Amino acid sequence: MPIAPAAFLDPALLAKISDLALLARTVVDGYMHGQHRSMRKGSSLDFAEHRSYQPGDDLRRVDWRVYGRTDRFYIKEYDADTNASVLFAVDTSGSMNYGSGAVTKFAYAQMLAASLAWLSQAQGDRVGLATFTQALVDVIPPSVRHLQRLLHTLAATTPGGPSQLVASIEKLGLLSQRAGIVVLVTDCYEQPDALGRAVDALRMHGHDLIVFHVVDPAERELPGDDDTTFEDVESGNLLPLKPRALRDTYQSLVRAHHEALQSRFAAAGADYVHLDTSEPLDRALHAYLDARLTRGRVR
């Protein structure tokens, strides 16, 4: 995959673009410039395979010959029908509003979700959105016609309030009876085992999961030497600390948390990508494409 010019991928520069649709198109066009890796099986009308009938399917697509042999309803699928349903689930809790540099975690999540949705739409996928704090807030079901609605909702969302990440993930699996791909964008402030159990439940509904763990550099490093009072952006609680005295222990705990998340998500069969808000978006785009190409189509 070619390397796009930095202007197309630098979060600090991208944050200056107020139009989320323009931003997403800029990122994807810049990243894919010179080479196009399609995730589709094809665009012909050649028969691909059967799948079980689901409520809402077009009865004209029922294979009546198969029904006559099996007494069960099956739908004919063609190569052009093999697009996936992709639900982008974005954490909009107060902790996502933190940023030590030019870009907050939520701004990075907005750019990431918008770019991946644009890319998915270009590949013929159905795209949808779910935002959440303590519960699901905005839900846009996956559709080939929902990209602009998704982008408008993302752009109009302001993060705030406490988070209940586990409960929100559990509810994601109930949004659609048709298995698809869930792209979770969050800062993962939850115990790895609890998150893993929620992901297990999501996977039991037949969904594949790609987790983008968004982290601000200051959260990883705990910079500064002076005594500082830290404020919990979700609860408002204040905590006086001496960063220099705690830094080594803090960084060790952070690394352990990230390693535990990676291990638990892997055990659940989910892809896990750790992202720093200072990093260009190409790493996220590349990880997403690789996960899609490795996994193949999900229905």
Image (cartoon, rainbow, N blue to C red):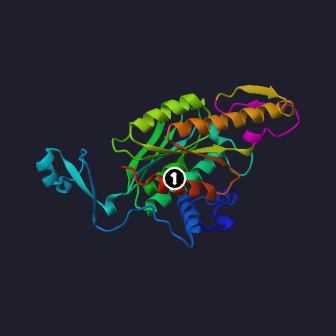
Question: Which residue is found at the position 68% from the left and 28% from the top?
Answer: 236
Q: Name the residue at the bottom extreme.
A: 34
Q: Residues within 10 Å of mark 1 (few under 14, many from 20)?
A: some
In-image side of 55 versus 144 (left or right): left
Q: Is residue 231 magenta?
A: yes
In-image side of 144 versus 104 (left or right): left
Above/below status of 114 relative to 164: below
Q: Name the residue at the front extreme.
A: 69
Q: Is residue 172 visible?
A: no
Relative depth, front residue between 183 and 117: 183
> Which range is magenta?
218-234
- SS type, badge 1: helix
Q: Residue 21 at x, y = what percent?
A: 52, 60
Question: Which residue is found at the position 56% from the left and 29% from the top?
Answer: 193
Q: Residue 3 at x, y = what percent?
A: 64, 67
In-image side of 9 versus 148 (left or right): right
Question: Which residue is found at the position 61% from the left and 68% from the top?
Answer: 2
Instruction: Name the amino acid type tagged 1.
Output: Ala
Q: Which residue is mark 1?
A: 291
In-image side of 41 versus 221 (left or right): left
Question: Which residue is found at the position 17% from the left and 44% from the top?
Answer: 72
Q: Residue 45 at x, y = what percent?
A: 28, 67
Q: Is residue 66 visible?
A: yes
Q: Is residue 296 magenta?
A: no
Relative depth, front residue between 156 and 200: 200
The quadrant of the image that shows the N terminus is bottom right
